[in-house]
Image (cartoon, rainbow, N blue to C red):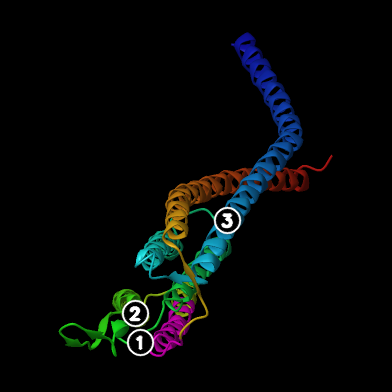
Amino acid sequence: MKTRGITLALAAASLGIAGAQEEAIDIEARKKSLPILEEHVKAREKRLTGIANEIVGLHRQLDGKLGRMVERLSNIKDSTKSGYRVSKIKMEAIEALQESIESYQSKRATVFQAIREGRTQIPKEILEGEVEHFDEHIEKHIEQVLEISKSFTQDKDVEKYKRIGGGGGYYGWGWSDDIYEISDEWYQNRRDRTMNKKQRAEVTEALKDSIDRCESLVAGLRNDLRRPNLTVADRELMQAEIDRHTAMLEKRQAQLDELLIVENPPTDPLSRDAALEVQYSLEDLTDDLQNDLSSVFLKHDQLNRERVRLYKLKANLEARKKWLADHEKKHPE
């Protein structure tokens, strides 16, 4: 029996020594893992910065193309040779801008919903910055739509008939009267009036739809604010969104008022061939716009995935540092 007791005691002692050694090895391994994790964090931060810079570059490239297009279209108009081609090009440009606005609005809604539901590991402040980023682009494109809209040739008084001959001449059958025909300028003014009326109605309707959406969203958020179980953070988030959309409502109404009276813009008439060249350029630009927007949104998704990955790494690093600090306090050497 004694022999068995001694054997068991020795076994327990050896287990204690092994446990202590294992603990010592574990502590040493944890300490050595810190610089490795820190390097990993730095690598992911560098990767994150690279993606963010790519997004900035894509936005700069996209904004440059759109800015040049809007400036070009805002300074030209149809001639009697181009008919309604320039007006049609402008309406196609407005449609392309509207599609980009809707894309940004959809992306914004997704990000805001993620903030509201708290279903992301990305800090709320980062995502709120992304919402503001999308809002800026939405507002910029709406202003560009209005700039093109206000560049359409306005209706003006034009003599319908022009004299092309006759008057005062005597022919074998008698004196001739003046001969008139409808002028090309009158036909062009009618085309301009028709196209301007059409685009104005479409832009006005889009602004009114935006106002309706804002009013509905604000009403819904105000109703949600009445819920008693909301956290302080939820209330602050909803109130900030209400404030943003209230300001947006005022801006949309002002933009709507701008379209009521538009002066005839100082634009230059284009020939038929020149209008066709602008049309071809716009077709290329529209393709570029769709591709660039897709690239931008893919990069935004990639950026957010990298953010989640980075925040997990940082949380792991901080947890290890805290564990080691707590352990050293409990087991000072």
Q: Which mark is residue 307?
A: none
Q: In the rendered image, which residue does mark 1 sit on? A: 158
Secondary structure under badge 3? helix
* Label whose residue precedes the other's in the sequence (2 or 1): 1
Between label 3 and label 2, give the one nearer the viewer.
2
Q: Main secondary structure of the magenta part?
A: helix
Residue 152 showing in the rendered view: yes
Q: In the rendered image, which residue does mark 3 sit on? A: 59
Horizontal and vertical percent for residue 150?
44, 79
Quarter in which the N terminus is drawn: top right
Horizontal and vertical percent for residue 120?
47, 54
Q: Amino acid at mark 1?
A: Val
Q: Are marks 2 and 1 in contact (CB under 8 Å)?
A: yes
Residue at the spot x=46%, y=84% of the render? 264
Q: Residues within 10 Å of mark 1 (few under 14, many from 20)?
A: few
Between label 3 and label 1, give the one nearer the viewer.
1
Q: In the rendered image, which residue does mark 2 sit on? A: 189
* Label whose residue precedes the other's in the sequence (3 or 2): 3
* Label whose residue precedes the other's in the sequence (3 or 1): 3
Residue 262 within the magenta-colored segment of the rendering? yes
Secondary structure under badge 1? loop
Can you tell which quarter of the image residue 103 is in? bottom left
Residue 214 or residue 39, whichever sits in front? 214
Q: Which residue is most to the right?
A: 333
Residue at the spot x=47%, y=58% of the render? 274
Instruction: State how far apart marks 2 and 1 are (Cα).
Output: 7 Å
Instruction: State how far apart marks 3 and 1 are (Cα).
Output: 44 Å
Magenta segment boundaries in residue numbering: 240-263
